[in-house]
Image (tube, grey):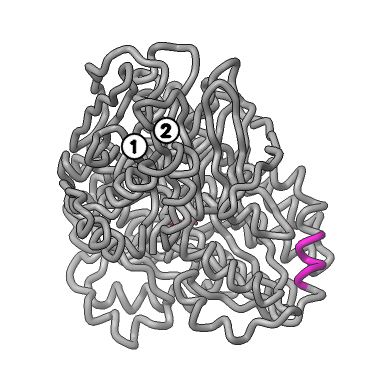
Amino acid sequence: MCGIFGYVGNSNNAAGIVLAGLRLLEYRGYDSWGISVKRGKKLDVDKHTGKIEQAITQLPKSTLGIGHTRWATHGGVTTVNAHPHLDCTKEVAVVHNGIVENFLELKEELQRIGHHFVSETDTEVIAHLIEEYLKKEGFASSVRDAFNRLKGLSAIVVAYAPSAEIIAAKSGSPLVVGVGDNEFFVASDAVGIVKHTRRVIFMEDNDMVILGKKLKLIRLPEGKVVKPLFHTIDWEFKNVQKGKYKHFLLKEIYEQPQVVENIAINYGADTKRLSKLIEEAFGTFMLGCGTASYAAIAGTYLFSRVAKKHVNFSIGSEFAYLEDYLTPKSLLIAISQSGETIDVVAPVEKARKRGSQIAAIVNVIGSTLYRQAQHKILLGAGVEKAVVSTKSFIAMVAILILTAYTSAKRQEEAKELLMQAAGNIRVILQNAYVKRIKELAKKLVKSSHIFVIGRGLAYATALETALKLKETSYVHAEGFAGGELKHGVIALIDNETPCIVIAPNDETYDDIISNAQEIKARGGFIIGVGPKNNNVFDIFLETSDAGDATMLSQIVLAQLLAYYLALYRGIKDPDKPRNLAKSVTVK
Ligand code: F6R
């Protein structure tokens, strides 16, 4: 959600570097963009609505620039509302992620003393506030004092025409500083930086950094200079390119067998540690949002069935209403790809304040969640650029399978199941199988609704299958627990309504087949997914048995179906579904 990119250094192509950086951050989701560069003692600005795609910018040569991709919150999608925002003198330019909660109050205060606003955004107040402080103090202290007055979670990067420095500060939304040879980068995500340097600093909340000839890190609110902690990113630029694939989504779907194998081979110790924490805790909660919440639901079934342990589940945004249970003996397992989802990091922060133990299952090293947690397991899924989550989900579930089996002292068995599942995923990714998925996608192209049912662990599969179909192909799809059909949903079934039936070879098989019969009796069109065929299926897509890990290949099948359905329904870029952002950093 919104992307920030800033550059200062020896190159006089700041605008080009910033534009290329913004392009790498496009996947986060945005609807307008803009860049500002320093030209002598002035700032030039170039702003647009729509996508960057092949855009070029006419901005002049410069060694300092800041840019932004905006996902509208305050004010519509217009060029005026796009960032960077300027002050009255047009000497201060600000790009901003997050929300200034007290912006109306600040705006009124600034208007009363003569500031003139041109946009509807909350961001513009920051530029005017800095302008006000600049009347009495220097650039750095003006940014510090202005930032200290902002309420809410924000990340900003500021350029000031008379200065050869850019200044960044954050209190929630992520910012990463890249340290090159006589040059610095700052971005919302290391993905934008790794092309230039792998040496980075993950900014902490209330850090402010001054970047120019040198780097100076300052702790807010007081402004104490602190020593930066440098990290080296262990992935390369080629990992964030599409390579031979048409879309990142497809590339990431195809990367999944290695993701599962990696977990089977290398995660023994990590999952042992997590299972011990669950053992010792007095009450464990798992939480996540969207796809990650379905991984958490799968986790609750796995812990109950395999490890005979009760684990509570909550959607991240609902956890605030459940947290009264938390004590210092509670364990909160937060699951997130980005580690920046506000509905995850906010409740985690509250739980931390209550003294609870925090474990994170997270993909992005250095992310807010990663830093919040005392116990961390990285998903190891690599960079996921398509907005729609695929390999992260597979990694989350694989880690939970391994942890539940480890709790039950059956770790080796789980490793074998995961290896088997990786093999089964490879079968689904072969041309012959993909051809069958494409045929099904063609058949479903005109459907207005698709229902997906499952029971037990397959209920989580049904939910995730439906979400993939919805967000990728814009078909209305709903996932249900098979047993819920008769309690209402069956009223929606009529002639030829497609219904995907997730039928693993477990204790749910007979009951889910009965549910499929009920749907068929009302004219529904049944697509069976599982290891065993059945007469009730109109179409059967086999996913070989890998015990509890069968779910993994069923999900991959669903991802491919969603992808091809999107293409056949004329969706041009399934990497960036409408209205969605990769990293949801606002409530
Ligand atoms: C769906 C999807 C979203 C995310 C959700 C949480 O494909 O990607 O539902 O799963 O926004 O994001 P993270 O995992 O980054 O916390």
Residue at horizontal 37 percent and vertical 66 percent from the top: 452
Q: Give the range drawn in magenta.
A: 273-278
Q: What amino acid does circle 1 point to?
A: His
Q: Where is residue 453 in the image (x, y as percent from the top left)?
A: 40, 70
Quadrant of the image occupied by residue 274? bottom right
* Left or right, residue 565 beside residue 582: left
Q: What secondary structure prevails in the magenta region?
A: helix
Of the residues shown, which amino acid type is indicated by label 2?
A: Phe
- Say if 286 sits above or below 193 in the image: below
Q: Mark 2 points at which residue?
A: 5
Q: In this view, does 526 lie above or below 64?
A: below
- Label 1, residues with CA under 10 Å away: few <14, some 14-19, many ≥20: many
Residue at the spot x=45%, y=71% of the render? 317
Question: What residue is drawn where x is 36% and y is 57%?
Answer: 99
Q: Where is residue 218 in the image (x, y as percent from the top left)?
A: 60, 43
Q: How many marks?
A: 2
Task: Please identify the quarter of the rendering in which residue 498 is found.
Answer: bottom left
Q: State the residue at coordinates (60%, 16%).
A: 181
**View quadrant of ligand 1:** bottom left
- Would you name the residue on which mark 1 appears? 68
Question: Observer-nearest residue: 503 or 73?
Answer: 73
Please check the rendered image and state whether residue 20 is part of the magenta-colored stretch, yes or no: no
- Magenta span includes 277: yes
Q: Which residue is outermost to the front?
A: 136
Expressed as whole percent of the image width and height from the top left, the position of residue 586 reads 39, 59
In the structure shown, which secondary structural element does the residue marked by tag 2 occupy? Answer: strand
Question: Do the CB atoms of the residues marked 2 and 1 lie less than 8 Å apart?
Answer: yes
Tell me which numbered mark, 2 or 1, is placed earlier along the sequence.
2
